[in-house]
Amino acid sequence: MEELLYKNDIDIETFSGGKKGIPQGACGLLAAVGEFSLDALLKSAMCLQYRGRIGAGVTLKGIYKDNSFYVFHIMYRSQHKVSELEHVINSWGVHILESQDLVAKRYYYEYDLPIIKRYFVTPPTLEEMMYREKIKDDYVYIMKHVAKFNKDFMDDARIFSSSKENGTFLTAFELTDTIKIYDLPKYEQEYYEACLIHLRWPTSRGRGLWWGPQPISLGEIAGIHNGHLSSDKSNAIALEQLGINLHVGTDSEAIFLQTDYLLRNGYSLEEIEWVLSRKYPQELKSMPEDKRVRYNEIVNDPILKRMKMSGPATAIVLVEDVILGFTDRDHLRSFSIGYNDKVAILGSEQRAILSAAYFMKEELENVYDPDAGKVVAFEIEGKNIKKLSYGWKR
C-alpha cells in the first residue's frame, strides 16, 4: 500500500485542476437542521449535481459530540509529507491520541486521492497554553494553530475539519463519489443535528481542486456559498485588520469567518444583515430614526464597513448552534427555505427542499424564497430547532 501511495502522489499542477482549469457552473447548496434523515438529504442533493461536475463536500454536526478531544480530518498531497507535518502538529504541545485512515485503502486504487487521515487530538494544558501563547481557551489556541498550519503548508496539506463535534468530508469529485469514498451512509445510524452539502468546486480558484471544495470548516464554523463576491478583497482586509487570517483563500471563507466574528461580538441578526446587505437610500428613509442612527454607526465603522456581501451570492453558515442563510441585496442568486416544528431545510433551489421533504415524509408548513438580502436563522438545541427573530443576538 505504501508503494501505491508514493506512486499516486499528485503533482501540484494536477492537484490544482491542470491546464484546463475549472469548468463553468454554479454551486449547489443544501442544508438541514433538526430531526431529519441523512440518507434523504443526500438523495435530494443529487438533483443539484447538474450545477457543477467537480468538487463535493458534506459537514455533519454532532457526529463527534460529547468528546473532550478535537477531531482533525487532514489531507496530504504527498505521503512524503505525512510524518513531517505530524511532527509540526505535535510541536503545538497537543497530544495525538490516535490516527487512522479516513478512507478505505481500496479507494486509492480507484481514485487519484491525496492521503486522507483522521486524528483524535487533546489540547495542551492551561499552563502550557499560557506559557506558549498566553491563551487560556483551548478552542482559541487550537483554531489559531489550525489556521496557521493551513496557511503555512497550503501546497502540502490542509486540515479540513477541526471540531470537537462536527465532521467535514470533501473530495474533488461528484457527490456520489464523496458519499462512497467516506462511506457516509454509516453515519445515518449515528447522532447528528445538522448537515451542510455543497456541490461544485468554488468560483475562486484558491489553491487547487482538493483545497477548494466546500463546506469550508474551521472549528465550530462551517459554511457553503454560491456565487462570487466583488467585495472579496474588502472582506479579507477587514479580517486581516482583526487578526483573522484566511486559511483556504476563497471569497467564501471570508463571509463565513466574518459571520462568526459578528455573532461572537454580540451583533443581532438584523445588525448582521445590515453589515452584509447595505440598504438602498429609499429603504433608509423609511427606517425609524433610532434604527437609522444605529445602522449608520455600524456601516461607518472602519472595520465593519469593509464587511459586505457585494455581487451575486447566497451563503449558509453554521456557527456552533446557529445556522444562518442569506442572499445578496439584489437577489442575483436563488435561495429557498422550508421548515416546520421539527426540521428546517435551506437550499439554492426550492426543488431540492421539496425533494428532501418528500423523502423524509415531512409536511413543511412554510416554503418560500426570502426577500433579497434578508437573513434567516435557526437555533439548534440538540435536535430541536427554533426560528430566530431579527432582534436575537448571542
Image (cartoon, rainbow, N blue to C red):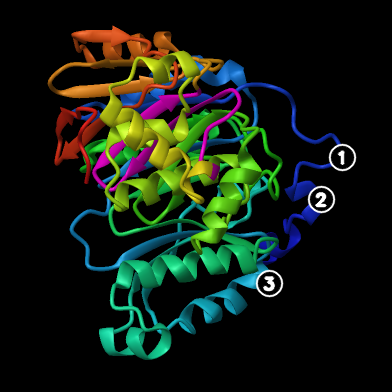
- x and y, in percent, of residue 107 in the image: 57, 46
Q: Is residue 140 above or below residue 20?
A: below
Is 336 or 25 nearer to us in this picture?
A: 336
Q: Is residue 307 above or below residue 31?
A: below
Q: Which residues are magenta?
A: 306-328
Q: Is residue 198 left or right of residue 113?
A: left
Q: Are marks 2 and 3 in contact (CB under 8 Å)?
A: no
Q: Earlier in the sequence, mark 2 or mark 1?
A: 2
3D distance between C-alphas at marks 1 and 3: 25 Å
Secondary structure at badge 3 equals helix
Q: Residues within 10 Å of mark 2 (few under 14, many from 20)?
A: few
Which label sits on residue 80? 3
User: Which residue is identified by label 1?
Assistant: 19
- x and y, in percent, of residue 75 in the image: 56, 58
Is 171 or 277 nearer to us in this picture?
A: 277
Which label sits on residue 13? 2
Is 137 or 359 nearer to us in this picture?
A: 137
3D distance between C-alphas at marks 2 and 1: 8 Å
Is 293 or 196 nearer to us in this picture?
A: 293
Q: Earlier in the sequence, mark 1 or mark 3?
A: 1
Q: Is residue 273 above or below residue 320?
A: above
For the point 49% across and 31% down, which residue is it? 198
Q: Is residue 15 above or below residue 317?
A: below
In front: label 1 or label 3:
1
Q: Are marks 2 and 1 in contact (CB under 8 Å)?
A: yes
